[in-house]
Amino acid sequence: MRQGPGEQGRKVELDAELKKTHREDVKANGFNERISNLVSLDRAVPDIRHPGCQTIKYLKDLPTASIVIPFHNEALSALKRTVHSVFNMSPPQLIKEIVLVDDFSNREYLKKELDDYMEQFPKVRILRNEMREGLIRTRLNGAKVAVGDVIIFLDSHCEANVNWLPPLLERIALNRKRIACPMIDVISNEDFHYETQAGDVMRGPLTGSCTTREFQSTKQSEIGGPRLLILSGFWTSQLGMTCLFGVRMSNSRALET
């Protein structure tokens, strides 16, 4: 079992020095960048799947995925960990490519240093906007060049869980008109501990305006949109991409239209 700061999803203990600089360390990105730098790029997270999910057999032939990751002035360690996580937790034959789309970042480490680092991954390519475009246009720029059967939009500071990709892709393979939506777990912005959300009791339909409602027992809340989703070429080529979709983490559910 891997050991080290944040391993197995445990929190990173803040010593006196980290507590002293905590407020400054979260200012740039909304999470503690110094803690992120301490956590391994290949850290292990707990397998939080229901025991029944761990024995499910998925289709042998699944569509390939283009993972589109937009970013602007992201913490380098968080961006690297996102890429490492996707590769570590995914069957390699299902990853067609990872497209990093830089929305006109001005931090030097996101230029040549990032380019040089990503050269070790043949499936990674980097696009750069010539001006600040914002999240939606940046995602669209990545989608325009994607060559996989399915497009997945990820945030630039997330981590995939065990076997996250096959259940999502299978839903698309069985019906390309489906839009699959994942359960989204939580990584603490203060100490990077990993925690699952409410689990199987959560359900969430997608509305016509591309917002998501989540239900837990008798409670209902509207999350807003666009929510993190995954879609096939049917939606982008035939209907046009009027909404933006993405996916992260594990435990899938699906909407059939």
Image (cartoon, rainbow, N blue to C red):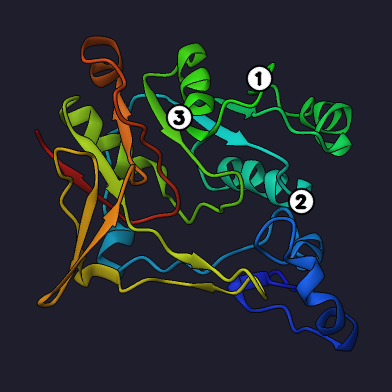
Label 2 SS:
helix
The part of the image, by quadrant, that contains residue 257 is top left
Q: List the residue tagged with mark 2.
A: 77
> Which three-letter amino acid code belongs to the residue tagged 1?
Asn
In the picture, measured across the screen, residue 67 lies left or right of residue 38, that is left
Residue drawn at x 77%, y 68% as measured from the top left: 35
Q: Identify the disc placed on residue 46.
A: none
In the picture, measured across the screen, residue 219 lies left or right of residue 32, that is left
The part of the image, by quadrant, that contains residue 185 is bottom left
Q: Identify the disc placed on residue 129.
A: 1
Q: Indicate the position of residue 12 as horizontal and vertical percent values.
A: 72, 78
Residue drawn at x 58%, y 71% as measured from the top left: 188
Q: Indicate the position of residue 241 as horizontal and vertical percent values.
A: 31, 21
Q: Identify the disc placed on residue 94.
A: 3
Mark 1 Cα-neighbour bin, 10 Å: few <14, some 14–19, many ≥20:
some
Residue drawn at x 88%, y 35% as measured from the top left: 108
Mark 3 Cα-neighbour bin, 10 Å: few <14, some 14–19, many ≥20:
many
Callout 3 touching callout 2 (CB < 8 Å): no
Label 3 SS:
helix
In front: label 3 or label 1: 1
Residue drawn at x 61%, y 72% as measured from the top left: 8
